[in-house]
Amino acid sequence: MKSDQKKQKGFGSTAIHAGHITGENYAHLTPIYASSTYVFDTAEQGMRRFSGAEEGFIYSRWGNPTIKEVEEKIAALEAYGLEKNGQPLKLKALLHASGMAAISNLLLGTLKKGDKILSHYSLYGGTQELMNKVLPELGIDSIIVDLRDLQKAEDAIKKNPGIKMLYLETPANPTIQCVDIEQLSLLAKENNLLVAVDNTFATPYLQQPFKYNVDFVLHSTTKFLNGHGTAIGGILIGRDIKLMNGKMLKVHHLLGGNSNSFDAFLLTQGIKTLEVRMERHCTNAMKVANFLKQHAAVASVNYLGLPSHPDYEVAEKQMRHPGAVLSFELKGGLEAGIKFINQLQMCVRAVSLGTCDTLLSHPASMTHYGVPEADRIKYGISNGLIRMSVGIENIDDIMTDLGQALETAMT
Ligand SMILES: *Cc1c(COP(=O)(O)O)cnc(C)c1O
């Protein structure tokens, strides 16, 4: 094995080269190690590997070369350009079977009965359900306030001494609300709280929460990191290497939410183009937002790149570009939403986000079809709301498709 200490400096080059080690067959890409277990030459070697005296793989739930490459790549990207005491920041990443597995590992590895989580009300649905339905049965409750108001966060911390963790998701799924990582992390650290950030919507190219001294960053790698919609996955990254290699790794091994080499391989290849994809995603999204804003069929556009968005300034402060997810409201309500979605010719009708292709969904007739209308509207899911993850197709094709579907929605 030859350790590849390449001399890359830029973010895009780091995304391509970091984490790669040339193996003994000199394959250009690290192969998919489809092997559940690893052999020992002797009993003594087995002993050395188990005791940690010798590095090496033992069993794929505990580690696999294809998985290790992508873990090191993502750790390098989240740490990109950051320093600690004058030295490059070192981070440790653990790949999981899904974003939810990474979140479960984080919460079950750091919290115990009686501990509380402080978070914002707009969160990914799965995270919200985990906090509302699963964790309370283990004695871990969540305090949900509007974290865009720092005073409310401070009051909640003062009132609830059990709060151990500040859990942020910014931009949040699906509202794209943002919270101020720097301010909230400062407040949390004054009160000895752990801070975790779900960075799925931004990716390390658009936003690096470790800049603000947070403890953990996590992603659903299913989205922009993979970028091609080929695998479900999640990653948990931590700055306390001892904690990551100790308790967090132990919990990871025992909960069994490990990923597999095939998905890790796909993720490695996807990440290599992260920088160019994100650039294109974001320029396309800005053009789409401006196009929709002036269209007669559209009542309003919710995009972080528009100064009308309430979190425009926070996004501008902590993100390189405003991302690629937006939503808009059709004037024609439910009927217009269904007509519009059905009329799309190139853009794809699907939930999820972060793929090369543009994905659109109509929550009222899809994800939230079973939710009573009054409840739906309370959560901001109005009848004519369309969610869109802007892809990297040629912008003219995206606009032509949206334009003709909007015309139909008006008839
Ligand atoms: C999709 C998503 C998750 C969950 O990830 P899975 O890979 O589907 O388990 C968590 N957080 C955010 C912000 C997401 O968009």
Image (cartoon, grey):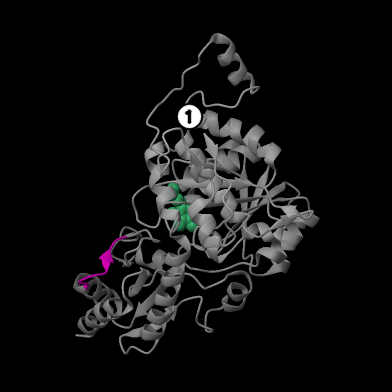
Task: Tell me, yes or no, if residue 301 can be seen here.
Answer: yes
The reply, left or right, for residue 295 in relation to residue 161 is left
Q: Which residues are magenta?
A: 344-350
Q: How many C-alpha atoms fall within 10 Å of the one at disc 1: few (<14), some, or many (≥20)? A: some
- The overriding secondary structure of the stretch rendered in magenta is loop
- Residue at the image point whose x is 39% and y is 43% from the top: 263
Q: Amino acid at mark 1?
A: Arg
The reply, left or right, for residue 274 in relation to residue 178 is left
* Of residues 145 and 196, the one drawn nearer to the viewer in this rendering: 196
Instruction: Return the x and y of residue 90 as percentages of the image width and height.
Output: 67, 48
The reply, left or right, for residue 155 in relation to residue 226 is right
Instruction: Return the x and y of residue 384 as percentages of the image width and height.
Output: 33, 75
Instruction: Return the x and y of residue 217 as percentages of the image width and height.
Output: 59, 52
| Secondary structure found at label 1 | loop
Question: To which quarter of the image does residue 300 belong?
Answer: bottom left
- Residue at the image point whose x is 35% and y is 66% from the top: 373
* Of residues 181 and 95, the one drawn nearer to the viewer in this rendering: 95
Q: State yes or no: Cβ of the residue under disc 1 lies below 8 Å from any atom of ligand 1.
A: no
Question: To which quarter of the image does residue 83 belong?
Answer: bottom right
Residue found at the far top of this picture: 43
Residue that carries the numbered disc 1 in the rendered image: 61
- Residue 411 to residue 27: above or below: below
- Residue 259 to residue 300: above or below: above
User: Per the image, is 346 magenta?
Assistant: yes
* Of residues 172 and 32, the one drawn nearer to the viewer in this rendering: 32
